[in-house]
Amino acid sequence: KRAPAWICNAQADNLAVAAVGSFAKSAAGTEFMQQMAAADARALLARKLREPVQQRIADSADAASKNSADRDSALISKITDQQLQGTRVLKSVYGPRGTLYVLIGFDEAGVNNLHQSIAADYMKQKRQSD
């Protein structure tokens, strides 16, 4: 039996951005496996979302120093990770050896809302630290 297409290409209908996470079969149980597979998918999704947000902020910000850019990148990463904590698993399937695969993602409106939310949180925290 072949793997579903969403596992191979990390995409599904109506999703603008998606990520697949996995976790090997574990004696800790299915709930633990689901949590770890979802965490893996969130980490991948966060990487995909950070770059557009960083670009959006860079485009709207004044010219900044390299040190500020490094701090900004770390702050954006932290905010992105926080924003993704509640992400739901949209699909899941077990592989032939017991590995659990999960899909998480957002449609176009969800991506835009998330980008705006991350940028707003960034600007708020940036003002508080200045």
Image (cartoon, grey):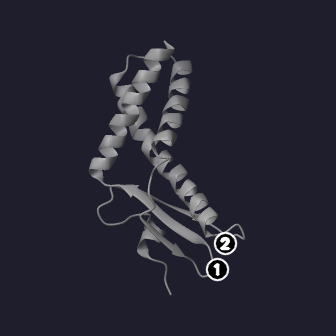
Q: Nearer the viewer, mark 2 or mark 1?
A: 2
Q: Residue at x 47, y 46 (%)?
A: 84
Q: Which mark is residue 75?
A: none
Cβ–Cβ under 8 Å for marks 2 and 1:
yes
107, above or below 29, in the image: above
Q: Residue at x 52, y 57 (%)?
A: 41
Residue 125, x across and y down, in percent: 46, 22
Crowding at label 2, few (<14), some or many (≥20) Cα neighbours within 10 Å?
A: some
Name of the residue lying farthest toward the top: 130
Can you identify the residue that label 2 sits on?
25
Q: Residue at x 48, y 33 (%)?
A: 76
91, above or below 52, in the image: below
Residue 8, x across and y down, in percent: 47, 70
Name of the residue lying farthest toward the right: 27
Q: Residue at x 50, y 40 (%)?
A: 82
Disc 1, SS: loop
Q: Which mark is residue 97?
A: 1
**Earlier-in-chain disc, 2 versus 1:** 2
Q: Nearer the viewer, residue 105 or 62?
A: 105
126, above or below 25, in the image: above
Residue type marked 1:
Arg
Residue 50 can be seen in this image: yes
Residue 102, x across and y down, in percent: 50, 65
Residue 6, x across and y down, in percent: 42, 69
Q: Using the numbered discs, state the Cα–Cα distance from disc 2 to disc 1 in whole angstroms.
A: 7 Å
